[in-house]
Image (cartoon, rainbow, N blue to C red):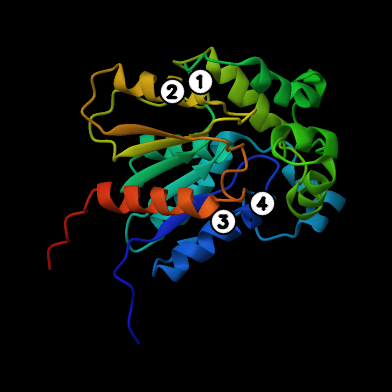
Amino acid sequence: MTTSTKTPIVLIHGLWMTPKSWDTWAERFRAAGHEVIVPGWPGIDDRTVADIRSNPEALKGVGLKQIADNYERIIRALPEKPIIMGHSFGGVITQMLADRGLGVAYVGVAPGQTAGVTTLPLSTLWTGTPILSNPFGRNGAKPFSKRHFHFTFGNDLPRAESDQLWDEYAVNSYNRVFFEGVTSVLNEKNGVTHVDYSRPDRAPFLVITGEIDHVVPPAIGKAIVKKYTATGSPAIVEYKEYAGRTHRLVSQDGWEEIADDALDWATTHQVREPEAAV
């Protein structure tokens, strides 16, 4: 039996989603010979969309540090450091893991901003309105309406087609995650999503955005990159934007191009770990 020598890949899903949202990229990367690990956030784990909707209790009160710590445990159990890719809030977690030095390359696919990145377009604020409008629901797990899904994920589609995707993919929110993400934006030093933007030994990081994304529009992606590069750190941080793409970068028609670009960039730029002495 032969073992792949290709770098393993960890894929981190975002808010309102499950590991199922990565089925496209995961299958493509496995076909290319990579081991791909796609864990669910604590409370989601390997549960079905229908099960989570019917019983979202396990999502309540779970925060970003708990989620990042869970991924760290999974990654440290791997025989080698992986390439880490995260979508949306999964991109925030990817940056938190990068700050812990856990990967050989990182890709943020429409990544949310970490502490101190204050760019917040109106469309981004609107995506959080159903959660942020009720501060007493901070530790809740609010259902994700079909209407709001159409604005956030399906804005390139007729409502009926967007509703079909909601049926297949969408789950309740981790309200605490959203509150922590937003409050960290204005608290660079002590926010939950604090990272060291000047870290010189961080493995290369690629930020990808879609031109018509309502959740993480290009302005946010560019602001994230600027936050890192403005420090003068020698660590590689690059940016790529795709025309006509929404927040659904991992499954919108043409996703194959983005997946291949992300994989090629990560494998080309990955930091080779020194072999352990025998």
- Residue 27: percent from left, percent from top: 53, 65
**Sequence-first disc among 3 and 1:** 3
Distance, label 2 to label 3, CA atoms, is 28 Å
Distance, label 1 to label 4, CA atoms, is 26 Å
Q: Nearer the viewer, mark 1 or mark 4?
A: 1
Q: Which residue is mark 3?
A: 39
**Sequence-first disc among 4 and 3:** 4
The answer to whether mark 1 and mark 4 are in CB contact below 8 A is no
Residue sitting nearer the eye, 209 or 1: 209
Distance, label 2 to label 4, CA atoms, is 27 Å
**Sequence-first disc among 2 and 3:** 3
**Sequence-first disc among 2 and 4:** 4
Q: Hey, what amino acid is under mark 2?
A: Lys
Residue sitting nearer the eye, 181 or 218: 218
- Residue 45: percent from left, percent from top: 65, 56
- Residue 110: percent from left, percent from top: 53, 35
Residue sitting nearer the eye, 211 or 87: 211
For image coordinates 81% across by 57% down, the residue present is 51
The label on residue 18 is 4
Q: Nearer the viewer, mark 3 or mark 1?
A: 1
Judge left or right: residue 218 versus residue 202. Answer: right
The label on residue 273 is none
Q: Which residue is mark 2?
A: 222
Tag count:
4
- Residue 274: percent from left, percent from top: 17, 55
For image coordinates 17% across by 60% down, the residue present is 275
Q: Can the viewer see residue 181 in this picture?
A: yes
Q: Hey, what amino acid is under mark 1?
A: Ala
Residue 75 lies in what quarter of the image?
bottom left
Q: Which residue is mark 1?
A: 219
Q: Hey, what amino acid is under mark 4?
A: Thr
The answer to whether mark 3 and mark 1 are in CB contact below 8 A is no
